[in-house]
Amino acid sequence: MRFMVIVKADRNSEAGVMPSTQLLTAMGKFNEEMVKAGVMLAGEGLHPSSKGARIKFSSGKRTVIDGPFAETKEQLGGYYIVEAESIDEAIAHAAKIPSARYGTIEVRPIMALEGVPA
């Protein structure tokens, strides 16, 4: 079963501050281990919301809202797509993400749609 591990942004990531060299090295090592174990299918960090946009639809009208967005605690900082037997296994992998010690990580099962390749 596939899971999305959502890494929440923090004040520093939203300000465009890169993690320390030590944390980047730890993240690289963690990512390599996850790939070698066949668990990590994809994963990327995201630029701050100031470089993004939201699209809102209301009454058939589209509105584009440029970032940054006010609620930093609701912003995404990055993601992983992992393969795991259960949500408990996915949580165990997510808990090892080096940046997990500094913020919030969400784990959600990916809904497989019939007729759409996984």
Image (cartoon, rainbow, N blue to C red):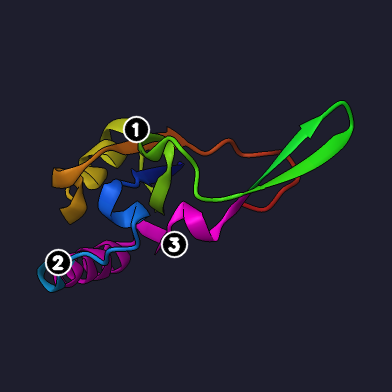
Mark 1: few, some, or many residues within 10 Å (few <14, many ≥20)?
A: some
Residue most extreme to the left: 22
Which residue position holds label 3? 47
* SS type, badge 2: helix
Residue most extreme to the right: 60
Point out residue 64 in the picture as x, y percentages from the top left corner: 72, 47
Q: Amino acid at mark 2?
A: Ala
How far, Cα to Cα, is label 2 from label 3?
19 Å
Magenta span includes 44: yes
Q: Residue at x 16, y 55 (%)?
A: 98
Q: Amino acid at mark 1?
A: Ile
Which span of residues is magenta-colored?
24-53
Which residue position holds label 1? 87
Which of the two discs, 1 and 3, labels the residue nearer the N terminus? 3
Looking at the picture, does residue 84 appear above or below residue 86? Answer: below
Magenta span includes 88: no
Which residue position holds label 2? 26
Mark 2: few, some, or many residues within 10 Å (few <14, many ≥20)?
A: some
**Callout 1 touching callout 2 (CB < 8 Å):** no
How far, Cα to Cα, is label 1 from label 3?
27 Å
Which of the two discs, 2 and 3, labels the residue nearer the N terminus? 2
